[in-house]
Image (spheres, helix red, strand yellow):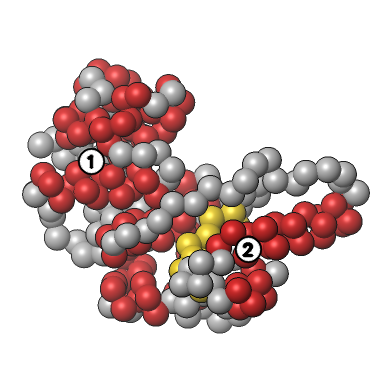
Amino acid sequence: MLGERAGATGVSVIAWCLMDNHVHLVLEDCTDCLSELMHSLLTRYAAYFNSRSGHAGHVFQERFFSEPIESDRYLLAVVRYVHLNPERAGICRAGDYAWSSFGEYVGRPGAVVLSRTETVLDIVQGAEGFRRLCEDDAEPGLPMTRRCDDEGELLGIANDILRGAGLGKASEVGNLPREQRDDALRLLRRTGFSIRRIERMTGVGRGTVHRVTGAGERGTES
C-alpha cells in the first residue's frame, strides 16, 4: 500500500520500519503531497485491518506526526534511529528484522523494495557505510568512526538525535514530562554521550542523569 500510494502522489520513500503498533517513515515530499499520501494510506490500511480482524472504529489513535529534515546529518541520525527500533525494543538485531528498509540498504536477497536508497548510500559511501551507521555503539549521527571533540557539532548531533525521536532539542529536555525526559537522557547516553556532557547540554543535574541512565553504561567522561 505504501509503495502504491507513494508512487501515485510522487512522494519518495527514503526509509521505513513497521513495528507492532506504529510505523516510522522517512519520506521526500517534493510535490507537497505528504498529507494526501498519509490520509489515503492510513484510511486504506484501517479499512483492511478492520475487515481482516473484525475490529470496529479507529485504528490509529491520532493524526500522524511529521518533522522536516533539513541537513544530511539530521537525515543520517533519523535513518539510523528508524532502523534501530527493533533492536532497541528487544526484538532482534536491526539487520535481522524483515519489516524495515534495512534489507534494501544492504542488498539482502528477497528484501521488500520500497525505498530510494541512493540518497543515504551516497552520503555514507555504500552498504558497508550504512552498516557502520546502524551499529548501536557508533558515534551518534555520524557515519565515520572519528572522534568528535567540537562542542558545537556535538550539540548539533544531540539535537538531531533527539528530534529524530520526537523529543525536541537538548536545551528543552529538562522541561519535558518526566517519562519523556528520561527517554531523552537514556537515548543520549546510549548513543555515546557522557553523563557530564549530557548535564552540560540539557541542564539536567548529573545525579538525575546517573540515576536514570545507570552507572555502568558506556560513554567517555569529558
Q: Quadrant of residue 215?
A: top left
Residue at position x 36%, y 39% in the image: 168
Residue count near mark 1 (Cα–Cα under 10 Å), binned few <14, some 14–19, many ≥20: many
Q: Establish if 73 lies above or below 200.
A: below
Q: Position of residue 81 (x, y in %)?
A: 41, 53
Amino acid type of the residue that numbered disc 1 sits on in the rendered structure? Phe
Q: Position of residue 39 (x, y in %)?
A: 67, 58
As helix, strand or loop, the secondary structure at mark 2 comes to helix
Foreground residue among 81 and 173:
173
Task: Tell me: 20 left or right of 97.
Answer: right
Are discs 1 and 2 less than 8 Å apart at CB? no
Q: Establish if 30 lies above or below 170.
A: below
Say which quadrant the N terminus sits in: bottom right
Q: Position of residue 62 (x, y in %)?
A: 65, 42
Q: Quadrant of residue 210?
A: top left
Say which quadrant the C terminus sits in: top left
Q: Establish if 146 lies above or below 21.
A: below
Residue at position x 56%, y 81% in the image: 109
- Of badges 1 and 2, nearer the viewer stands 2
Residue at position x 51%, y 67% in the image: 32
Task: Kindly identify which residue carries mark 2.
Answer: 36
Residue at position x 23%, y 40% in the image: 193
Q: Residue furthest front?
A: 32
As helix, strand or loop, the secondary structure at mark 1 comes to loop
Foreground residue among 135 and 20:
20
Task: Kindly identify which residue carries mark 1.
Answer: 193
Residue count near mark 2 (Cα–Cα under 10 Å), binned few <14, some 14–19, many ≥20: few
Q: Is residue 29 visible?
A: yes
Amino acid type of the residue that numbered disc 2 sits on in the rendered structure? Glu
Q: Is residue 102 visible?
A: no
What whole-number distance in Å separates the C-alpha atoms at marks 1 and 2?
Answer: 39 Å
